[in-house]
Amino acid sequence: MRELWKDIPEYDAYAVSNHGRIRRTKASRGTRVGKLLNPWKGTDGYLYVTLCIDREIKAVAMHRLVCLAFMGPYPEGKETNHKDGDKANPRLDNLEWMTRTENNLHCVHVLGKNGSGKNSTSSKTYIVTSPVGKKYKVKGLRKFCREQGLHKSHMFEIANRSSKQKTERGWTCRHHRIRLDEHQTA
């Protein structure tokens, strides 16, 4: 598919392509027209770009910009669905409007995922180590953090190695890797 570019409504200094790329359309201090922006992956798995509007910096999800430019404003009660289930794929041909319910049904019936699947944080097991070295095998990290007075988002970032922070108040966290002899087949 040929790459097409459209100006982004509400963000007049930028354009977006149907391939999900963002570029500057107006020069600004330290930037040039045509410069492609470098996306970054958020902790939620979506790709973001940082836009500067009236000297205000704003992080915006790339799929939202593609939809805004090519599909118009979000219809009430609708959200973006990634057809292939890949949150890091903001191409126009991968995006569509759906209600939250339709999106959840698509996730289960088309992609074969559900809220307790392997990608769900509620189904993952973590090894949490206390400041004194005691190890805990934890199934529900949110509940554990609440009980211990820890920031759950910091612990998830430590476990996912998406943070420079290595501990939360001396506690560490990592994903529990299941060995083949631990794995039970039904």
Image (cartoon, grey):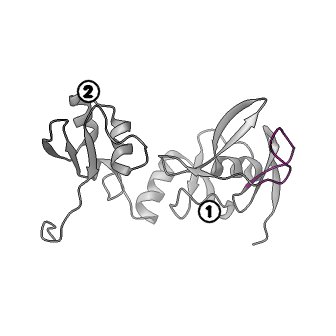
> Residue tagged by mark 2?
149
Q: Residue 13 at x, y = what percent?
A: 83, 42
| Residue 134 part of the magenta-drawn span | no
The residue lying at 84 percent from left, 39 percent from top is: 28
| Residue 31 part of the magenta-drawn span | yes
Q: Residue 121 at x, y = what percent?
A: 33, 48
The residue lying at 63 percent from left, 52 percent from top is: 39
Q: Is residue 45 left or right of residue 58?
A: left
Q: Secondary structure at mark 1?
A: helix
Residue 49 bears which disc, if any?
none
> As shown in the figure, which amino acid type bears the numbered disc 1?
Asn
The residue lying at 38 percent from left, 60 percent from top is: 113
Residue 94 bears which disc, if any?
1
Question: Which is closer to the viewer, label 2 or label 1?
Answer: 2
Disc 2 crowd rating (10 Å Cα; few below 14, some 14-19, many 20+) is few
| 167 shown above or below 159 | above
Mark 2 and mark 1: Cα distance apart in space? 40 Å
> As shown in the figure, which amino acid type bears the numbered disc 2?
Gly
Determine whether label 2 and label 1 are within 8 Å by CB.
no
Upstream in sequence: badge 2 or badge 1: 1
Q: Nearest the camera: 135 or 92?
A: 135
Q: Is residue 16 left or right of residue 144?
A: right
Q: Which residues are magenta?
A: 22-35
Q: Residue 153 at x, y = what percent?
A: 38, 37
Question: Within the image, what quadrant is residue 29 found in?
Answer: top right
Of the 4 image quadrants, the one containing the C terminus is: bottom left
